[in-house]
């Protein structure tokens, strides 16, 4: 399945478009999505920072999802670097 | 949840309004209102700042504001009105980044609820800031990781003390 | 001491203005502002309140506000602007009795300075309130004694915890 | 010497005028002023509350004065019941 991942914070600077689309197997976990984004970053983003990705979380529109959870089907995802609001 | 007003204001479309926040959390039964206003300041870690861009994942942020408000309502006994507002976009020096107001019957709860909400928003909301400097450079601020091991599940504030400052994460706008 | 604005507003002549307080404590170097607004509420200890009259010994009160501000400046390192305003006269439900605002570079100091000043004003300022009830009765509130043994010399806040409530002294307006 | 004492809070209800004038010996202490006000209250105020006076402080325009301090000459004084600002 194709999963769209919106980019936020420092990931905005990796490419002009605000999202990437990654191909995952059916039933993939968030950990698989993390691995796919890391592979994509290493392949396509000259300024990719794997350490930042390791400290970043994945989320749907409504909740942060843990690595052991499945990627929900048909839902846009987002990659969230460490936050610094306010 | 009409006792809580949760809002994200795109700077191009308007500004956060402290008066509206005070008005919203007022009630004939409330004797105490505490409000926090976060503004962009001109200097951080010795560098002259010209502005800050706030990036935000809006639907998740509003969801988080609602969880933060629900927790405050549980913690402070329900007699509570809250206003949580955050700006989005490119702000200049002095612009308001954040307005949180809490109204309660007595002042102690107002102070504690306001503080708790401010810390939760700063530590758990999907909001990122990029500082712009006089020399033209820009830097994304480090911050609180939302990964497991860093933050509990459920989007609630993690166990930072109120005065917590990240060693790895200076808090430039504050 | 132009970093601190200290004022008593006779209700017949005007109202406390939270906007003016926010404006006064703002500074390009300040990222955090905390404001407390105390309002007259409609119910206290189960009695319907119609209003509160605030009596005040104005010169001593302003002197005390200046001491409170000076202590906050020492405690919070000097990078601090304060607004301390109190109303005088007969107030109705919802009228503002007190406005305290603190601006500092970082939010932690703003919260703590605001709280410390509010508690000091409430516990040491020569201000008395008389509650007026629906049934026509009026009662002067009990409060904090300024006698030795009750309060330290020098007019500073005594050692009440922030959440302190007098057993002998309900705090009707709050 | 004559000392004017301004009345505040619940003492406002003791008489229509907002102050009393009490005669004290030269060099009198605040404790003497307290005794004089108590005598005045017992003599002239039907609703006088000695317990309230015991919890009240004396002050000039600029400072609270302790019982062991002298009453300053030529300065108006005030009687301050327990305070309840805000």
Image (cartoon, coloured by chain):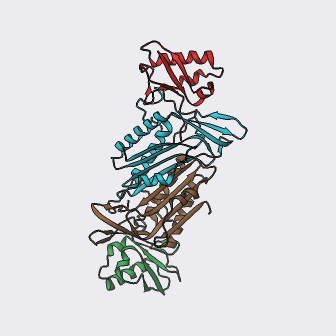
Chain colours: A red, B cyan, C brown, D green
**In this picture, is A36 found above or below C86?**
above
Quadrant in which residue C97 is drawn: bottom left
Image coords of residue D51 (percent x, y): 32, 72
Total marks drawn?
0
- Give whichever of B69, C142 is nearer the camera: B69
Quick check: A67 left or right of D44? right
Image coords of residue B15 (percent x, y): 55, 48
**In this picture, is D68 found above or below C69?**
below
Extreme residue toward the top, this view = A25
Extreme residue toward the front, this view = B13
The residue at 62%/62% (across/down) is C2
Image coords of residue B143 (percent x, y): 55, 33
**Whether residue B46 is visible:** yes
**Whether residue C151 is visible:** no
**In this picture, is B158 found above or below C69?**
above
- Give whichever of B87, D64 is nearer the camera: B87
**In this picture, is A4 found above or below C97?**
above
The residue at 57%/63% (across/down) is C5
- Give whichever of B87, D72 is nearer the camera: B87
Image coords of residue C120 (percent x, y): 47, 60
């Amino acid at each position: 399945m194709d999963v769209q991942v919106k980019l936020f914070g420092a990931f905005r600077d990796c490419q002009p478009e605000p999202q990437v689309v990654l191909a995952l197997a059916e039933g993939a976990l968030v950990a698989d999505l993390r691995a796919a984004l890391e592979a994509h970053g290493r392949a396509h983003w000259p300024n990719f920072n794997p350490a930042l990705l390791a400290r970043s979380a994945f989320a749907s529109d409504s909740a942060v999802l843990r690595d052991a959870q499945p990627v929900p089907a048909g839902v846009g995802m987002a990659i969230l670097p460490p936050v610094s609001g306010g | 949840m009409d006792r809580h007003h949760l809002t994200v204001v795109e700077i191009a479309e308007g500004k956060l309004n402290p008066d509206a926040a005070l008005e919203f959390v007022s009630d004939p039964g409330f004797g105490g209102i505490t409000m926090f206003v976060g503004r962009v300041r001109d200097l951080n870690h010795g560098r002259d700042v010209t502005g800050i861009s706030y990036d935000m994942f809006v639907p998740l942020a509003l969801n988080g504001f609602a969880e933060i408000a629900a927790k405050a309502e549980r913690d402070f006994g329900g007699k509570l009105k809250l206003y949580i507002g955050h700006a989005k976009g490119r702000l200049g020096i002095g612009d308001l980044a954040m307005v949180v107001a809490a109204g309660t019957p007595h002042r102690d709860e107002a102070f504690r609820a306001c503080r708790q909400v401010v810390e939760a928003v700063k530590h758990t909301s999907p909001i990122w800031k990029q500082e712009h400097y006089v020399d033209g450079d820009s830097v994304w601020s480090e911050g609180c990781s939302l990964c497991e091991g860093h933050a509990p599940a459920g989007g609630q504030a993690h166990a930072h003390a109120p005065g917590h400052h990240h060693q790895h994460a200076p808090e430039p706008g504050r």
